[in-house]
Image (tube, rainbow, N blue to C red):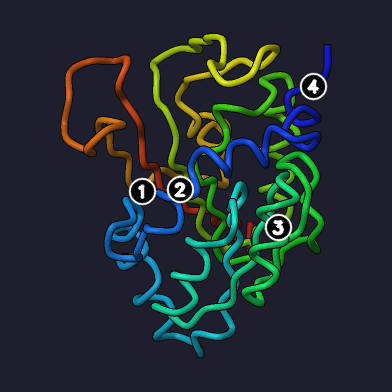
Amino acid sequence: MSKQKQIFLDGEGDAWLRRNKSGVDKRSMESDPLFDILQRVLPENTQQADASSWKILEIGCSNGNRILNIHNYFGVSVAGVEPSTQAVEEARRLGLDVKRSTADQLPFESKSFDLVIFGFCLYLCDVDELFKIASEAHRVLKDSSWLLINDFFSRGLVQRNYVHRSGVKSSKMDYSKMFSWHPAYEVYHHQLLGHVGQEFVDDPQEWMAITLLRKFIDQQT
């Protein structure tokens, strides 16, 4: 059976964009569920250096709408990774540095980003590659940096068939645990919301999570 990443590289990424393009294109910075967290992280830190020196990477960035909004609003440098050929082409036409790849193979130099965002993509990644994915995110993050995860949430691993494509599983779990076990990472913010409407809900089937982690490696230890 093909890896899920290969299925998305071979065309399901393009199909996802076609199904969701209207919603993706309409999203503004203010309507983004990550906006409040970004406001809390970026203004504090960009005061310490010129905003343009900050580099943000979104993994699963689609056609670059979010990172373009972030660049325009905060003035920081942005980049993205996306398996969809169509999405990458659209992002590049906007002048964005978006590369066609998957989360387990990030085509960027080590310690090059101040913030990495997983933008609702981990639930479609191969579960047996989560170690690789975490390792790659850790590699490209600077020693003092931030990690922001927005995805489906479940207390334990729950998998279901992906309704849009046979051979693909949709996986829910607490994705912050990919990093929080490591001594370099601390959870600064963790919030559960409903997937639709972003309200507080008690139905575990509807939970999504927004989690902010701080990566800090003390060079004196």
Nearer-N-terminus badge (1/4)? 4
The residue lying at 71 percent from left, 42 percent from top is 103
| Mark 3: amino acid | Val
- Mark-to-mark CA distance, 1 and 2: 5 Å
Check disc 3 and report the residue beneath it: 88
Dot label at residue 188 = 1
Q: Label 1: how many residues lie within 10 Å, few (<14), some (14-19) or many (20+)?
A: few
Q: Mark 4 points at which residue?
A: 3
CA distance for labels 1 and 3? 32 Å
Tell which circle, 3 or 2, labels the residue nearer the N-terminal end: 3
> Which of disc 4 and disc 2 is earlier in sequence?
4
- Secondary element at image label 2: strand
Screen quadrant of the N terminus: top right
Can you give x and y, in whole percent of width and height, for residue 135 in the image? 72, 40
- Mark 3 lies on a secondary structure that is helix
**Label 1 residue SS:** strand
Q: Who's the residue at 28% across and 58% down the image?
A: 31
Label 1 to label 4: alpha-carbon separation: 33 Å
Which amino acid does the dot numbered 2 rest on? Leu
Report the front residue among 213 and 94: 94
Q: Quadrant of residue 97?
A: bottom right
In 3D space, how far apart are the residues under numbered discs 2 and 4 (Cα atoms)? 28 Å
Label pair 1/2, CB-CB below 8 angstroms = yes
Q: Which mark is residue 159?
A: none
Q: How crowded is mark 3: few (under 14 residues within 10 Å), some or many (20 or more)?
A: many
Q: How far apart are marks 3 and 2 (CA)?
A: 27 Å
Furthest residue toward bottom: 50
Q: Which dot, 1 or 4, sits closer to the camera?
A: 4
Q: Residue at x 61, y 15 (%)?
A: 169
The residue that label 2 is drawn on is 213
